[in-house]
Image: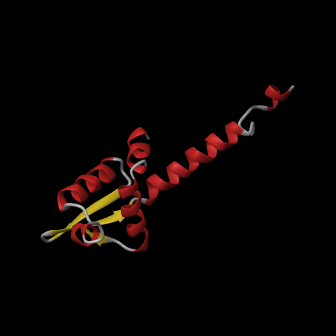
Amino acid sequence: MDKTYKALADPTRRKILALLRDRDRTAGEIADEFPIAWASVSHHLGALKEAGLVLAQREGQFIRYSLNTTVFQELIQQLIGLAQRKNGRGRKETDHA
């Protein structure tokens, strides 16, 4: 999960994820949304893919990206577990005695 958190820490990557929330997009469509070099967008997409947050599917000469909802479900479960432990809900009944 370290790669996932690191990928989510970057605001450009979070914006890419927000774009993909609406619909799947090609790398070019994603790059068109940013005032940075295409190579930089490609780097961000690579980091998101390596973290498992996006899936990439080749369509001819294009690569279409989509959200990997499985990883987001795991991330949410982990965050819920952290919140429960922080609030004391993750403890056993014997811990309260």
Q: Where is residue 21 in the image (x, y as percent from the top left)?
A: 43, 68
Nearer-the-camera pick, 53 or 12: 12
Q: Where is residue 36 in the image (x, y as percent from the top left)?
A: 24, 61
Residue at the left extreme?
Answer: 61
* Left/right of residue 66 with respect to residue 46 in the rendered view: right
In which quadrant is the C terminus drawn? top right
Q: In which quarter of the image is residue 25?
A: bottom left
Residue at the front extreme?
Answer: 35
Q: Which residue is drawn at 35% across and 65% down?
A: 66
Q: Which colour scheme is used?
A: secondary structure
Q: In which quarter of the image is residue 90?
A: top right
* Left/right of residue 31 with respect to residue 60 in the rendered view: right
Q: Quadrant of residue 64?
A: bottom left
Q: Residue at x 42, y 38 (%)?
A: 2
Question: In the picture shown, does residue 48 fall above or below 2?
Answer: below
* Left/right of residue 2 with respect to residue 28 in the rendered view: right
Q: Residue at x 30, y 49 (%)?
A: 47
Total residue callouts? 0
Q: Where is residue 43 in the image (x, y as percent from the top left)?
A: 23, 52
In which quadrant is the N terminus drawn? top left
Question: In the picture shown, does residue 82 fall above or below 39?
Answer: above
Residue at the right extreme?
Answer: 97
Q: Where is residue 65 in the image (x, y as percent from the top left)?
A: 30, 65
